[in-house]
Image: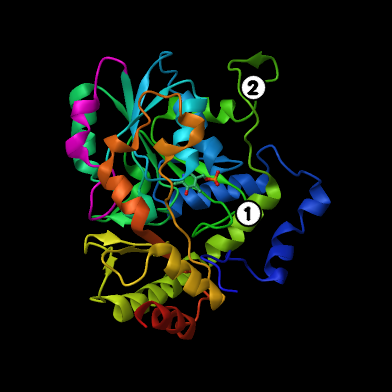
Amino acid sequence: MINVTKSSMPSFEEYCEEIKDLFESHWLTNMGVKHQKLQSELEEYLDADSVVLFANGHLALENSIKSFDFPEGGEIITTPFTFASTTHAIVRSGLAPIFCDIKKDDYTIDPEKIPQLINDKTCAILPVHVYGNICEVEKIAEIADEYGLKVIYDAAHAFGVKYKNESVANFGDISMYSFHATKVFNTIEGGAACLKDPDRVRILNEMKNFGIKNEEEVTFIGGNAKMNEFSAAMGICNLMHIDEEISKRKAVYEHYIERLDGAKGIVLCKIPDYVKSNYSYFPIVLENYKYTRNELIHRLRLQGINARKYFYPLTNSFSCYKSFPNANIADTPIAQQIALRVLTLPLYADLSLEDVDRICDIILE
Ligand SMILES: *Cc1c(COP(=O)(O)O)cnc(C)c1O
């Protein structure tokens, strides 16, 4: 079975070597040596002023939103073309998601459509670098400045991506990464918030540990969102191989492009030359293709290939948001058009070019 992704792992020996001292120290969590080491290595790799590690990407995002203490009833402008986590993080923080449509060419939020959604309740913009495609960060920054809004990026797909030579970690007030097992870089489960403001770094570090400031002071009603030492050790090991992993992904990606570029009924998403990609996903959009999307999925599955409908359904069509006045797919027609026709093909470092050929043969047949 070829799945849409396969988790990157170090060798067994490498991981054992990294966790060995934990069996001596018995210090398993609460910002131990592995946590500190991974944090500083990521600050360097991601070229980020500060990295705050979390138990997972979702909690990094939720705590990032909560760290601003936005007024109750506040609104955050976001995209419905994303994973459930993005929209849930807004709602679980007591705020209302306001859905903005996406661009047809790269599926990121359409900045032209943001201003019309802004009112006096708007607090922030939460765009997603979906599939590692980088949002129009300059335009979004301009809008945020003009209207006095915060910008929190969901960069879950964009680990290691650079835009015009700048690390994606440095856009907006906070950028959130996910280190989930299925992502380009993983700590089994894990995530991070990257930011510059030292006060907010302190707030986030306290929030992820029950709001505990020191032994005698508790300043926030925080939960528990700490990354444990075994996860951090996995991250330390995976980070040693990340450049190699990304270049293997690049070879797979380029082979797909070579085979599928110009194919009838298949629309591809190209990487602009000012973006250094991480080749995290390979979405195709079917346009007048000879089979329906479900038929193609079925044909691939018969050959043991598991392609996925990322991102369908749109988050603004989830039944859990049925009572939300602003959750309406009719307001985001381009997102809906893409969601109905997109298919994400298998892409991971160890996927062989022969397997890519097999997948492409079925698509082109
Ligand atoms: C994976 C993902 C998340 C959540 O990250 P976890 O580490 O799984 O909690 C959030 N947003 C997007 C777009 C994702 O793909």
Q: Which residues are magenta?
A: 102-121
Residue flagged by tag 1: what amino acid is it?
Ile
Callout 1 crowding tier (Cα within 10 Å): few <14, some 14–19, many ≥20: many
Question: Which residue appears at 71% of the width and 41% of the height?
Answer: 29
Measured Cα–Cα span from mark 1 to mark 2 = 26 Å
Location of the N terminus (image quadrant): bottom right
Is 167 part of what is drawn in magenta? no
Q: Position of residue 84 (x, y in %)?
A: 49, 41
Residue at image coords 44%, 63%: 294
**Closer mark to the observer between disc 1 and disc 2:** 1
Q: Nearer the viewer, residue 126 or 276?
A: 126
Residue 134 seen from this side: no
Q: Where is 159 relative to 279, above or below?
A: above
Check contact, mark 1 vs mark 2: CB within 8 A. no
Q: Which residue is mark 2?
A: 212
Q: Is 199 or 116 nearer to us in this picture?
A: 116
Q: Is residue 346 left or right of residue 327?
A: right
Q: Position of residue 272 (x, y in %)?
A: 22, 62
- Residue under numbered circle 1: 188
Residue 110 among magenta residues:
yes
| Quadrant housing residue 316 | top left
- Classify mark 2: residues with Cα within 10 Å, few (<14), some (14-19) or many (20+): some
How far across and how far down the image is residue 22, in percent? 77, 52
Asked whether mark 1 lies closer than 8 Å to ligand 1, one says no
Residue at mark 2: C-beta within 8 A of ligand 1: no
Q: In the rendered view, would you say 231 is above or below 322? A: below
Q: Which quarter shows the C terminus?
A: bottom left
Majority secondary structure of magenta residues: loop
Element assignment for label 1: loop
Report whether residue 14 is seen.
yes
